[in-house]
Each structure stands twice: as structure tokens, then as C-alpha cells.
Amino acid sequence: MSLGRTPIHIHDAVNSVTKNVNVIDKETVQLSESHGRFIASDLVATMDVPIFTKSAMDGFAIRSEDSIEASRDNRVAFTVVVEVPAGSSSDYELKPFEAFRIMTGAEIPESADTVVMFEQTKETDDGFTIRRPFEKNENIAIQGEECKKGDVILTAGSYVNPGTVATLATFGISKVDVYKKPLVGILSTGNELLDVDDELERGKIRNSNTPMVAAQLERVGVDYTIYKLEKDELESLYNKVKVILEETDALITTGGVSVGDYDLLPAIYEQLGAEVLFNKVAMRPGSVTTVAKLGNKYLFGLSGNPSACYSGFELFVRPVMNLMTGSQRPFAPIIDATLAGDFTKPNPFTRFLRAELNFVNGVIEARPAGFNKSNAVTSIAESNGVVILPGGTRGFTTGDKVKVMLTDVVGGAVDFVVET
Amino acid sequence: MSLGRTPIHIHDAVNSVTKNVNVIDKETVQLSESHGRFIASDLVATMDVPIFTKSAMDGFAIRSEDSIEASRDNRVAFTVVVEVPAGSSSDYELKPFEAFRIMTGAEIPESADTVVMFEQTKETDDGFTIRRPFEKNENIAIQGEECKKGDVILTAGSYVNPGTVATLATFGISKVDVYKKPLVGILSTGNELLDVDDELERGKIRNSNTPMVAAQLERVGVDYTIYKLEKDELESLYNKVKVILEETDALITTGGVSVGDYDLLPAIYEQLGAEVLFNKVAMRPGSVTTVAKLGNKYLFGLSGNPSACYSGFELFVRPVMNLMTGSQRPFAPIIDATLAGDFTKPNPFTRFLRAELNFVNGVIEARPAGFNKSNAVTSIAESNGVVILPGGTRGFTTGDKVKVMLTDVVGGAVDFVVET
């Protein structure tokens, strides 16, 4: 089968898949279910924050005017008349040189306008003395200083992280409008593939791409259904793909997109009338990665090569999934790193390689997985990111500056060292 | 209440909580449930990888000896006799100048020892010609070159990321031994706290720390139970803490650890006979963060201040949770970043501040949340990391080199730019 494939630049490939992505739909979830989702409507403050003027410290609330004369040589004495714990308030009207004993977070009574911290006082029998004047509003958080009622706090598409959850709680939002998660179908092609539970047979290998892609989807918070192909031939594949596209929002296939004699997916795309966005990308591995679109539904044709499948997912599937889920920041962060290892053979194409990332003194050290064949399996199993090696006429050596895609932080750092 | 608190260094604090952490227990889960867990026993290869010698390319498998004479001026012709698709094999014995047509991943038949890629041939009526000699094993993946049966592939404590899932699948491991997740109790103290569903009352605020901490636990893959305190007084609190410690592996309290008059937790720790690891840390905010231990159970006393609560979790709770779950890399990555904003007021203590991290040209730009009070709520809601500002006599300005703790990558980058 001749396809007349022309490789496109990785930027063009990413742009073509990430433009015009439609979000799935909206739904309302409990606040406790909202972490990891993307909010579907702007959040407008329903109140000032803080909602009342409150003490930022444990101490004494006084009238600032009573402190004007205070100095080291002329300590001014106050009498404590009322206690105001957090959660309480007081309508007591302070007289000159009277004070409230007040806790952090408690409402500042009308008649006080500044707070003296415990540490700034010397205790007396019925109160305390101070040795300097206090200006209005010291150690006080003023009503509305962090946001005003009516301010737009979050825009649609914001990721709900733990800080966002706290903000939603502050405004009493127990039900949150979020975008629905897409449902993705996964289908691996290839007569050589056995299920994980199957006994090995001559010439066959266990299918590792399906569970890997499932975990990659799980990592970006997307639901999936795994489909199975009865027979790796055109009609069976066509019918299966039709069913999957009815039942899901996107289909990820692994294998079946190269120019091998038995690769059927290009024919399927044509039969479906799907628009092929690209079928060759100027990158290694995974140059034959194909993405097609039928209406709003995506057909990701990832390579059957596990490394190419992995990085193809991170490059193309991840941002589309995030965009379908409403994200404003769909891409994995790309960060400077230092190469750990020599890769002296030059390659004309940009390489996107699974890599083990280590975090050492603030610098990411990236060790591409599988380069050293003797421990390829271990290095693949421990890869927690993707290293980018630009194409060109020279190779790379240890210490070279490279960039990495950060796909995960849970498999984090072995130690904790900060400058203090 | 005088506690005689001596602040300890952040490194000492982190070391004291992260030493001698016991894993909870082991359990066996389905492969499809294993992503995000930590494996509980070494994984030893049950077979060679690749398990058979196979073609790394689509092309023709030949006897290398037949190609010796090939050159530009003397193309050598081969006849294709058998096709070997992926998943198949062939026992046919090649005669001189015969070839198998072979697909990527297919087993190399005994009688062939090198593979010529389609692109390296010129087609003929019954086969092809080549113009250079091929050495043994070109375009071939040799049995066992990536790992040998008996090799230790993964050690106990390895994080199960998508690449790990693929490796487990390759070895036919459909049930995976992993460490159990801890169950954590969350309890917020403070009479000023309302539930997210409650109507606001004078002097009170909604409890945002409990849902925030719940989301932080979820982010590190840990289960939790939320407890409620009927009355914020000593006996009620003591009884509640006793119950929680029976039902869970760790307790996180928020609030109640400062030196305010109504903070009861220090007395509870004493009454329980818990060993207080520290009750003051040389850091801001959250210097009063307390961690105690009763047997193997942790009592994290986080500050009621939301910023201090957030960073206290990331500094102390996150690594302990990861260690309890069996991780070998318990800490959030700490990476170089550039400060986005001026913070000219010096602070003698190291500050750990929630921050919005942006990824620009490979560099992380860190904007601490809440410094600019007028948009504090928004900046807190969008914070996706922790910035570390060392203590000292000078302030910080835009462009200063700082370090950040990366707590998340899902709220990722707005664009995709790589050097190619």
C-alpha cells in the first residue's frame, strides 16, 4: 500500500490536533469529587474575602489613638475588658486604654482599629503595657482586601487543584460545575499480541500497549473502555471501529499504522471518511503516528512500538484529552534538564524518548530509557518523563542541556534539600 | 500555656518525620488497578526480553553470507519464498539466495540471520536485489538483549507508572503485589469554622482546610475519612482523637496548634503519651506546625492558616504518606525556578509559599500566591506548587533564582514549544 506520506513538523502536528477541540459537556459534581477536574463556568465571588475585618494575630485589639504616646521610656498601660476567641465577636464599646484579648481570625470589634501581638506587650495585673505607638490596621486583615464580592475568581477551564478546592469551599460552593470527562476506546491491533493472562505462544508477545495507554489515560484523569479485535482483518476492524466511535469520544489504536503489509488502519480511515490530520511526523520513534478526525471524534493511530506509543500519547493524546476536559493548560510542562548518558549517534529527526528523570540540586537529570540495551526493561519501567533530543548532525553527551516533558511528579525525589 | 518551643531547622524537621516510617501492609491488585501504587516485592524476569529473536523492521530476512559479494556495481538478487507476518514464525530452511518477507516483531526463522529493510532493496519479479553486504544481526532484536530471565527488573518500592504497567504486562503479571494505602483521618478544630453548606454567621468562616487537605491526600493517592468535632474543648477533642487513631493510620488536624489561649492539641498529645517530634519549625508560614507519633501512627498538627496548612502538608505529610505506601522517592521534586514578582521585605525565616508556576521556554516562573493582596484569592486558587524563599537579611526581586516544589503537573503548560 503506497500512502504518499509526507512527514510534518512536530509543531504543526501538535497544532493540528489541538486546534478546534470541543469540550464534551458539563456536569455538576460534589466539591469532594471536584479535585482533578476543570471548572466549566466562571466563578464570581459571592462575598468579600475576608468577609469581615479580623485579627491576623493572637494579641490585643486596641484603639490606635491610645497608643500615640507610647515609647521605650513611657510605656502605656491597657486594661483587658473582654475576650474575643476565633468565631466570636463583641459589640462592647472600648473606652480609652481598654483592650480586647483577641485570637487570630476573630472579628475586630467596631471600637478597636489595631492589634498588638502578645509578643509586643508586657503583662500587668489587669492587662499589659506597650512601648511604641501602633498605627491603624496593624496585624489586621481588612474586609475585602483579598477579593471583593463580584470579582471573577476563576475562569472556566481552570484546573481544580487542592487550592482551588479550598477557594470553592470558602465561597460555600458544595456543588461544582465541571466539564465531563471524555470516554476513550482503546484497541490494539496485531496478530502477534496475547493478553496478559495468556500462556506464551511461539512468535507471540503479550500486549503491553493497551494497559500502558490505559494507565496514561488514568494519569490525565480520563475514563476508558478496552475493546478487543476478534480478527485482525479489514472488515472485522472496520466494524469494530464503527462501534467504538458510536460508544466513545475518541479511539486510540496501537499498531496497524505503519507501511507494513498487514497494517489496515489507513484503509479504515478512508472507508470511514475520516479527515487524516497527518500520517507521518518528523520525529523518532513513532514517525508513522497518525491522527484522524471524524466530526468531533478523534482517531489516534499510535505506533505498535511501545516507546513510540508512549511518547505519541504524551505528545498528541494528552493535550487533546485535557482540551476535551476543558483545560486552559493542556500541555505537559517542558523544562530544562541535563542529559545523563552519551548518545553519540546523530539522528536527523527530533527524538522523543521515555526517560528516567532524577531531581538533583534543583536540576533535572534525564536518562533516556532503553539506550543501554542490557537494562532496557528496567529503564523503561522506571521512566517518568520524556526527553527531547533535537535532530541534527551531532550526537549528545552527558551534561548536554536538553528539554524534558514532565509527565508525572508522584515518582518524585529521593531526598529533600533546600537552601535556608 | 507556655510550651517552651524551640524552632528546629526544616531539614531536621523533615528528617525526623521521614525516618522510621513503616509501610502499612501488602495487598494484591489487578494490573488495571496498579497504576499509582508502589510494588511490594522485587520483580524478577520470568523470561528473556525479547523472548525470541525478532525482526526490528519490515523487510526481508536472509542469510548474511549470501550478501557478501553485493555492491553498487554488483547487485545480488534474492527470491522471496515465505512470508512471516508478526505473530508468526517459519521452520522453512532457506537455500542460498532465498529470503523471507518479514514484518516488524516477527520471529527470525532459524535459517536467516540478518534483515534487509524494504527501503534497502530494489524489487524484482520474484524478489529483490541489494547493493551492499549485510552483517549478521542487522535490524534484528536478539533474544534476551533487553533483559535475561532471572534479572531483577524492579525493586520493591518502585512507583507503578504507565511504563511500569507495560513491563508488568510484558511478563504476564495480571495480579500485582503492592503496598496498601494508608487511611488518614482529617479533623479541623476551631469554633469559627462552618461547613461548606452552612449559612454564614457573624464572626465565622467556612472550613476550607478540610476539603483542601482531602484533595492533597487524593493527589498523593491516599484514602481519607473526615471527622467532625462536636465541641472544641479538651475532653471532646481527646475522645475524638482516640477514636480516630484506632480507625486510621494517621491523623491530620488543622488549627489548634498555635499558642493561642484556645489551642488544645498540645495538651492532647501529652495526655495520649505521644512523642512530639517537633512543635516549632524555623519557617514561615506555619512555624507552629507540630508532628507527633504514637507507635507507628502519625499525628500531624497543621496550622489553621490555609497557606501554612497547605505547605505544611507538602513538606511533612506528603513524604510520610509516600513512605507509608512504600515509595523509594517520597519527596516532591525541588527544581530551579525564576521568581516572578518582587518581595522586598526580608524575612529571617525560610518561607514556603504556595505559588502559581508557569513553564516558559524551559524555565519555571514562580509567582507566590497571596503576596499581592488584591488578587490573593485567585492566586491561591491557581497555585500549583510551593516556592522556597531562603531566610536572610535581603528581599527578593523579579528574576531571582529560587527553588520550587513541584506538586502537580496536570495544571500544565499553555503551549508546546520544542527545539527541533
Image: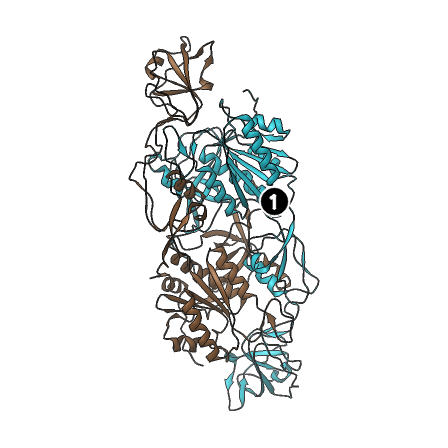
Chain colours: A brown, B cyan
Residue B265: which quarter of the image?
top right
Task: Indicate the position of residue A15 as horizontal and vertical percent values.
Answer: 37, 62
Q: Tell me the quadrant of the picture where the N terminus of chain A can be found.
A: bottom left
Residue B2 shows in this picture: yes
B333 or A344, which lies in front? B333
Say what secondary structure mark 1 lies in.
Answer: helix
* Residue sitting at x 38%, y 64%: A17
Task: Indicate the position of residue A57 as horizontal and vertical percent values.
Answer: 43, 25
Is residue A164 depicted above or below B48 in this figure? above
* Residue located farthest toward the left when viewing the structure as drawn: A150
Is residue B372 depicted above or below A33 in this figure? above
Q: Please, which chain is the residue tagged with disc 1 on? A: B
* Residue located farthest toward the bottom when viewing the structure as drawn: B125
Is residue A241 depicted above or below B208 in this figure? below
How many neighbours does mark 1 have within 10 angstroms: few (below 14), some (14-19), or many (20 or more)?
many
Q: Which residue is mark 1?
A: B323
Residue A349 shows in this picture: no
Is residue A266 depicted above or below A83 in this figure? below
A286 or A127, which lies in front? A127
**Disc 1 residue type?**
Leu
How many dots with numbers?
1
Task: Indicate the position of residue B177 as horizontal and vertical percent values.
Answer: 64, 55
* Residue located farthest toward the right when viewing the structure as drawn: B150
Residue A75: which quarter of the image?
top left
Task: Indicate the position of residue A91 as horizontal and vertical percent values.
Answer: 34, 20
